[in-house]
């Protein structure tokens, strides 16, 4: 059986709940398609998150690494197409706010995911949930860890790496107020559908 490293993020900025954390925790240890899921939760800190992800990849030696991030305001499940070599955005959980910094001095400008994102989108729609490819993961922590995973995959051929942004859960929307939201069960069902595609 293959191993999939699934990551979620801690709460950040104005979001007291991060639905990706709960999904990752609940799927830990499950078998989905041909993959055994190993979940880890990442901090939201520019100086830590990417290194932490790479450490997990080295320790767990997964066949695939899929990271999940909250995109408050999005209303579909959105597998990301590309990560760019830029860190920029509001303060992270340590109070750091980078401006136009490269993630890796010697890194490529960007990396395309090597996961079958079109098939993932089709699979999510097939289970009755809205999905679309996203062409930007932004320049905050989600882009950062996606970039680091793909940079690592570049040097370790055969490793699948990808990122999916998800909408807020109802639990978060109750706290936060002004974001479109999904039920936790639907968010999780959408992610499971994406993971199943990797075994087809
Ligand atoms: N979403 C943020 C970082 C953590 C998360 O869940 C992002 O989209 O960059």
Image (spheres, helix red, strand yellow):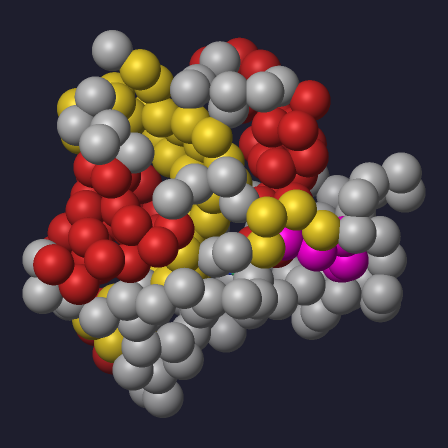
Residue 135 lies in the magenta stretch: no
Query: Mostly what secondary structure, the magenta segment?
Result: loop
Snapshot quadrant of residue 122: bottom left
Snapshot quadrant of residue 196: top left
Residue 86 lies in the magenta stretch: yes
From this viewpoint, is residue 7 visible?
no
Residue 184, horizontal then vertical, whole percent: 18, 60
Q: Is residue 200 above or below residue 193?
A: above
Residue range highlighted in magenta: 83-87
Nearest to the observer: residue 2 or residue 5: 2
* The residue positioned farthest toward the bottom in the image shown: 178
Residue beneath the point at 59% across and 55% down: 82
From this viewpoint, is residue 126 visible?
yes
Nearest to the observer: residue 12 or residue 70: 70
Nearest to the observer: residue 17 or residue 8: 8
Q: Is residue 60 above or below residue 117?
A: above
Residue beneath the point at 17% across and 28% down: 33
Q: Is residue 173 above or below residue 59?
A: below
* 88 left or right of 129 in image: right
Residue beneath the point at 36% across and 30% down: 39
Residue 119, horizontal then vertical, whole percent: 29, 50
* 148 left or right of 115 in image: right
Question: On the rendered image, what quadrant is the C terminus found in?
Answer: top left
Residue beneath the point at 65% across and 61% down: 140
Snapshot quadrant of residue 24: top left
Question: On the rendered image, what quadrant is the N terminus found in?
Answer: top left
Q: Is residue 70 above or below residue 163?
A: below
Residue 42, horizontal then vertical, whole percent: 51, 41
């Amino acid at each position: 059986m293959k191993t999939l490293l699934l990551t979620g993020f801690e709460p950040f900025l104005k979001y007291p709940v991060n639905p990706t954390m709960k999904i990752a925790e609940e799927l830990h240890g499950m078998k989905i398609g041909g993959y055994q899921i190993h979940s880890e939760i990442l901090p939201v800190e520019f100086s830590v998150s990417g290194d932490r992800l790479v450490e997990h990849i080295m320790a767990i030696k997964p066949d695939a690494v899929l990271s999940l991030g909250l995109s408050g305001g999005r209303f579909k499940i959105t597998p990301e197409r590309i990560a760019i070599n830029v860190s920029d955005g509001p303060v992270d959980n340590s109070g750091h706010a980078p401006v136009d910094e490269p993630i890796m001095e010697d890194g490529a400008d960007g990396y395309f995911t090597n996961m079958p994102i079109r098939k993932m989108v089709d699979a999510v729609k097939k289970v009755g949930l809205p999905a679309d490819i996203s062409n930007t993961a932004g320049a905050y922590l989600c882009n950062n860890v996606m970039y680091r995973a793909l940079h690592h995959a570049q040097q370790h051929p055969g490793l699948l790496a990808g990122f999916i942004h998800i909408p807020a859960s109802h639990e978060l929307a109750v706290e936060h107020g002004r974001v479109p939201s999904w039920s936790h069960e639907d968010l999780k069902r959408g992610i499971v559908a994406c993971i199943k595609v990797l075994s087809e």
